[in-house]
Amino acid sequence: MQMQEKALKAREMNQQGGMDHSAHANADDASGGFRGVFYGYLPCQEENCKGLKMTLSLNQKNNYLLVIQPAKPQNRESFEKGKYVWDEGKGTLLLTPNKDAPLRRLSIKDAGTLLYLSGDGAALPGDPDDYLLKRSDQAGNREMHIH
């Protein structure tokens, strides 16, 4: 009975965004609260491209996987793996790819929302809401990335 009550309380806190992960976060990994899968549909600058479907997986040991799928004819997914570093002071996330690809920067709006920035950390042109990636449990649609 007590276990059920604890599970119900934990579920309620999680649904309200008040879950405290500090008790089980690894001290070596301050970004523990930002692990998860984030989805977004960002503007595309290429010709005949209606947008970019992005899926960013932040995994243990500061590893990430980024999948980008342009919404255009003859689209081709690209996959990028690397390491991520969370800068608590600046509230940013820096993605460093394993292979020859540009550094990527995101601003942490809250535990479930990231804002995609330019490589130098500046805001991208247009409405900032067009550059949001939302964690899967808050995105409301886990099928944004389609294979």
Image: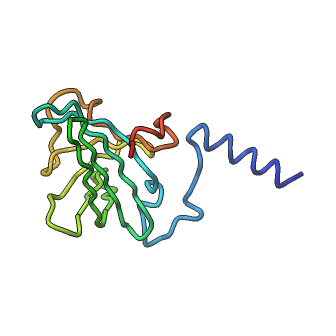
x, y percent for residue 62:
37, 67
Judge whether 121 appears above or below 125 on screen.
Answer: below
Q: Is residue 38 left or right of residue 10?
A: left
Left/right placement of residue 123 relative to residue 95 reads: left
User: In the picture, residue 113 is in which quadrant?
Assistant: top left
Point out the residue furthest to the right here: 1
Q: Residue furthest left?
A: 47
**Nearer the observer, 26 or 59:** 59
Which residue is farthest top?
127
Picture residue at 58% right of the left edge, 52% below the top: 20
Question: Where in the figure is residue 118, as x and y percent of width and height?
Answer: 15, 45
Q: Which quadrant of the view contains residue 53?
A: top left
- Residue at 21% x, 54% y is 104
Percent x, y of residue 92 = 28, 52
- For the point 59% across and 48% down, the residue is 19
Q: Is residue 57 left or right of residue 51?
A: right
| Coloration mode | rainbow
Question: Which residue is found at the position 27% from the left and 31% from the top?
Answer: 130
